[in-house]
Image: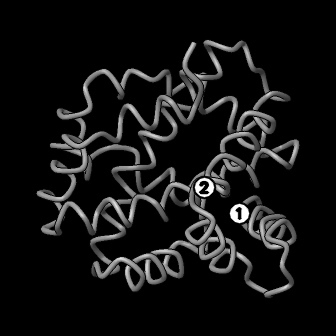
Amino acid sequence: MAGLMDLLGAALNENTIQQMAGRLGASDTQVQSAIGMALPALLQGLQRNAADPQGAKSLANALERDHDGSVLDNLMDFLGNAQQGPGAGILRHVLGDQQVVVQQGIGQASGINPNQIGGLLEMLAPIVMGALGKTTRQQGAGTGGLLDLLGQATGQMQQQQPQAFNLVTMLLDQNRDGNVMDDVVRMLGNFLKR
């Protein structure tokens, strides 16, 4: 049974990266570098949401309702129409007010225009949610298991790409106290007030 990082690794292969690069007008190398920073941002954002009981419930409901992993079966078709997919909505929930900061930071580090990074994030978000949905179904992870699953994935990312992980943590830590959780709680509170 494949884990979350296995599914993401298989989905984000050379063909997928070439397709994304073509859609964005960037080089394969730039896109691969940007993905290396975007994945930790998305996984940390999801982990923060899952750390809050209400956020975990909302995430579990979204996975059950909309993200069964079928996007991974038709990836090239999805990438051809990604701008019409659910990516923008997912990013509002996962990154909240920090989306622009994340786009700018990843753009600067990868040499890609921040607007293009926004497009990349819109492509990646449904892929990550699809992989997470498929993994939770395969492993029978309910609402409580989401946090563990995401914790394992972010731990793997931190070990594999410590510089990218640290950059993302810095971008998401609004008050620079070294802990993104307080920032997430504040973002979640603001989101729930809307």
Decide: is 181 above or below 167.
Answer: above
What residue is disc 2 on? 93
Residue 74 appears left or right of 64? left
Residue lying at 43% horizontally and 37% vertically, measured from the top left: 9
Q: Amino acid at mark 1?
A: Phe
Secondary structure at numbered mark 1: helix
Tell me: 131 left or right of 53.
Answer: left
Q: How many marks?
A: 2
Looking at the rendered image, the disc whose residue lies closer to the viewer, 2 or 1, is 2
In the image, residue 93 above or below residue 81: below
List x then y, in percent, for residue 64.
60, 22
Quadrant hosting residue 48: bottom right
The residue under the point 52% across, 37% down is 129
Query: In front here: 38 or 9?
Result: 9
Q: Are marks 2 and 1 in contact (CB under 8 Å)?
A: yes
**What separation in Å lies between label 2 and label 1 (alpha carbons)?**
8 Å
Graded by Cα atoms within 10 Å as few (under 14), some (14 to 19) or many (20 or more), the crowding at tag 2 reads some
Q: Residue at x 27, y 69 (%)?
A: 30
Pick the front one: 155 or 66: 155
Q: How is the image coloured?
A: one colour
Snapshot quadrant of residue 139: top right
In the image, residue 193 sits, relative to residue 93, either above or below, namely: below
Q: Position of residue 111 (x, y in %)?
A: 30, 82
Quarter placement of the N terminus: top right
Question: Which residue, given by chain and number where applicable, does mark 1 sit on?
Answer: 191
What is the quadrant of residue 122 in the picture?
A: bottom left
